[in-house]
Amino acid sequence: MKHGVEDTIAAIATPMGVGGVGVIRISGQMARPVLYDLFIPSNGSSSDSHHMVHGWLIDPATRDRIDEIMACYMGAPKTFTGEDVVELYCHGGVAVLQKALSLVLDAGARLAHRGEFTKRAFLNGKLDLSQAEAILDLVRSQTAAGAGLAVRQLEGRLSKTLEGARTGLVVLLAELEAQIDFSDDLPELNYKALGGRIQRWVKGIGALLAGAEPARLYREGVVTAIVGKPNVGKSSLLNALLGEERAIVTREAGTTRDSIEESINVEGVPFRVIDTAGIRHPKNRVEKFGVERAQGELAAADFVLIILDGSRPLGSMDRRVLKLAGGRPGVVVLNKMDLGSRLKFGAVRGLAGGMKTCRVSALYGDGLVELKKTMAVEAGIKLGGVGKDAVSINARHRQCLSRAIECMLGAAKSIKKGLPVDFITIDVKGAIVALGEVTGEQVSEEVINSIFDRFCIGK
């Protein structure tokens, strides 16, 4: 059976596990009848919209009380989804929530798909597609700055920023099509003025794209590769930064043969830290694949932590690592300083290309506070300033905006060459469609489904 918006959906809207409160969310035409079947209010009434009511969740078959809860009925259209919505605030135990959800499903609702509540909000015009994506960004944000960017997008900042360009293009298209249909009754187009209008829109959208990198890094995290030769303490440093034993650490060199990735918030900056295999002369195919992957992670990284054994003189493999990674955004970490220092810092500074250097003992935690501060400062330089007017642009948005610019530049080129109006309208229509895909005004069902499939059930 194909499910449509006429279905009533339900899901647990809070994380599974033991907690103070667990929420069951219900949306659709049957939401209110389900509430009446399962809820006995302590004051005799549960029909007022947008009012929290105390009472009991019951099993309608036996009339047994399941839990003492709060319930809230919210009548359409003034709800998140635009439909009738009921939320049941139960005690946050796994057994209680599962029983409550089972009763709701038995009463006529079905289990919601991933992101289906937000999808219905989009389909019912409560928010546009970029705002829906902002909800996912907000849920996944690891830092206050990243959450702030998501909130701005949820407010509709990106949509409003694009609205002027798209409206202008629609007006331009109407003018061009009028020229095609009524050329004898209208004055000739001012091609120079048309070109100027298009260039202004290109400049505005180009500025959006130019400012997208800091927002991307705050949303996705600064991809940080930990690199170095074997047995310099890369995995120990990862564990120390995380505050837990995530990577296996032994005295045997080359324990890590594959990449391990973890996320960490350092001084308000989100880092996606990747512990890579030691860079060495591989002895077998497994080690070769590990080294190749480490070099690939390094090439793709936004930031790098070069780990050296500060208790030993600089070796040829250390020099190779510094040559591969030196001069990039990052920090040189001189580890094992608890064993004494035998490294000549002048040689390190010369090969590192001006990168900051920190001394630490990953084993004992010495120097970690200073390392984290340095990481935040150096990554902050790459992040740049994220002002209060910044908007968050994801990969899908970038693709759409780049295509819009490409179409507008094509239209400008046709105008400059004095080509017939038909040629100009093709590119103008393409730009309108591309901008409409950002907000969901013109987007395929496949794209919509792929976006909401990334959400959790209950959101």
Image (spheres, rainbow, N blue to C red):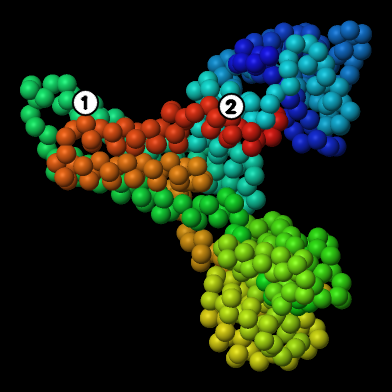
Question: Is residue 152 visible in this depiction of the protein?
Answer: no
Identified by mark 2, the residue type is Lys
Percent position (x, y) of residue 232? 76, 78
Task: Tell me the element at label 2.
Answer: helix
Q: Report which residue position mark 1 lands on.
A: 177
Percent position (x, y) of residue 370? 67, 74
Percent position (x, y) of residue 219? 57, 50
Q: In the displayed structure, would residue 124 be above or below residue 371?
A: above
Residue drawn at (82%, 69%) of the image: 255
Residue drawn at (36%, 41%) of the image: 404
Badge 1 or badge 2: first in the primary sequence:
2
Identified by mark 1, the residue type is Glu
Question: Is residue 177 visible in this depiction of the protein?
Answer: yes
- Which of the 4 image quarters holds residue 235? bottom right
User: Could you tell me which quadrant the N terminus lies in?
Assistant: top right
- Which of the 4 image quarters holds residue 296? bottom right
Side (left or right) of 293 relative to 311? left
Binning the other alpha carbons within 10 Å of mark 2 as few (below 14), some (14 to 19) or many (20 upward) gives: many
Side (left or right) of 357 relative to 389? right
Q: Report which residue position mark 2 lands on.
A: 119
- Which of the 4 image quarters holds residue 287? bottom right
Task: Tell me the element at label 1.
Answer: helix
Q: Nearer the viewer, mark 1 or mark 2?
A: 1
